[in-house]
Image (cartoon, grey):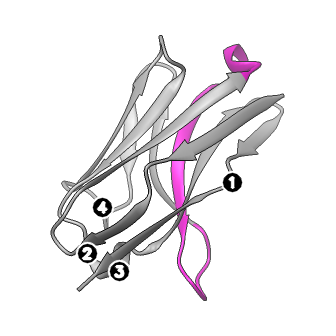
C-alpha cells in the first residue's frame, strides 16, 4: 500500500505562483513514477505532469514552460511548482503514484486562480 498526502493548494491571482507537495509513505520502493493530475468542474481528470524513478519528466502542453515537477527522494516527496497561473488552471489537483500492479491517488488539493 502507498499513502499520498497533498498540500499547498489555495487561492491565487492570475500570474501568481503556488507549489504543491505530495508526500508518499508506505511501500514506496515499488513506485515507478509519480505525477500530478487535475480535474476542473464538469471536465475529465487530466494529466498535468509526470516524473519517473529515473527523473524523466513530461508535461501537458497547456502547462509546459509554466509548471515544473520535481522530487526529493530523501523526503519521499514530489513537488509541482506552478508559475504564471491562469484562471483555466483552476481545478482540484491530485497526486498519483504508479506501480506495476496498479496506482494510488491522494485526496486532492484545490487550486483556484482568480482573474
Which label belongs to residue 88?
Answer: 3
Q: CA distance from mark 4 to mark 3?
A: 11 Å
Residue 51 sits in which quadrant? top left
Q: Helix or strand or loop: what does disc 4 sit on? A: loop
In the picture, the quarter occupied by the N terminus is: top right
Answer above or below: position of 107 versus 21: below
Helix, strand or loop at label 1? It is loop
Do the residues bearing badges 3 and 2 touch, measured as CB atoms within 8 Å?
yes
Is 96 left or right of 89, judged from the image as shown? right
Q: Which-is-in-front pick, marks 2 and 1?
A: 1
What is the CA distance from the residue labelled 2 to the residue labelled 1?
23 Å
The CA distance from mark 4 to mark 1 is 22 Å
Q: Is residue 55 left or right of residue 30?
A: left
Residues marked 2 and 1 touching at CB (< 8 Å): no
In percent of width and height, residue 109 lies at 55, 58
Q: Residues within 10 Å of mark 2 (few under 14, many from 20)?
A: some
Residue 96 x %, y %: 62, 44
Instruction: Please name which of the two marks, 2 or 4, marks the residue nearer to the observer.
Output: 2
Residue 86 - label: 2
**Residue 44 within the segment the image draws in magenta:** yes
Residue 79 appears left or right of 63: right
Q: Which mark is residue 63?
A: 4
Can you identify the residue that label 1 sits on? 107
Is the C-beta separation of discs 2 and 4 under 8 Å?
no
Mark 4 near mark 3, Cβ–Cβ under 8 Å? no
Where are the magenta residues, as a range?
A: 26-45
Name the outermost residue toward the front. Answer: 11
Q: CA distance from mark 3 to mark 2?
A: 5 Å
How far is the residue under mark 1 from the one under mark 3? 21 Å
Marked residue nearer the N-terminal end (2 or 1): 2
Horizontal and vertical percent for residue 49? 43, 49
Q: Secondary structure at mark 3?
A: helix
Amino acid at each position: 500500500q502507498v499513502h499520498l498526502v497533498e498540500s499547498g493548494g489555495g487561492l491565487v491571482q492570475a500570474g501568481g505562483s503556488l507549489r504543491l507537495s505530495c508526500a508518499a509513505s508506505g511501500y514506496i520502493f515499488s513506485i515507478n513514477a509519480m505525477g500530478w493530475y487535475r480535474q476542473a468542474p464538469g471536465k475529465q481528470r487530466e494529466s498535468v505532469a509526470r516524473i519517473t524513478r529515473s527523473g524523466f519528466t513530461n508535461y501537458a502542453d497547456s502547462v509546459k514552460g509554466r509548471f515544473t515537477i520535481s522530487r526529493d527522494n530523501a523526503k519521499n516527496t514530489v513537488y509541482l511548482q506552478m508559475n504564471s497561473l491562469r484562471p483555466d488552471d483552476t481545478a482540484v489537483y491530485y497526486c498519483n503514484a504508479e506501480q506495476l500492479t496498479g496506482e494510488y491517488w491522494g485526496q486532492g488539493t484545490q487550486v483556484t486562480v482568480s482573474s
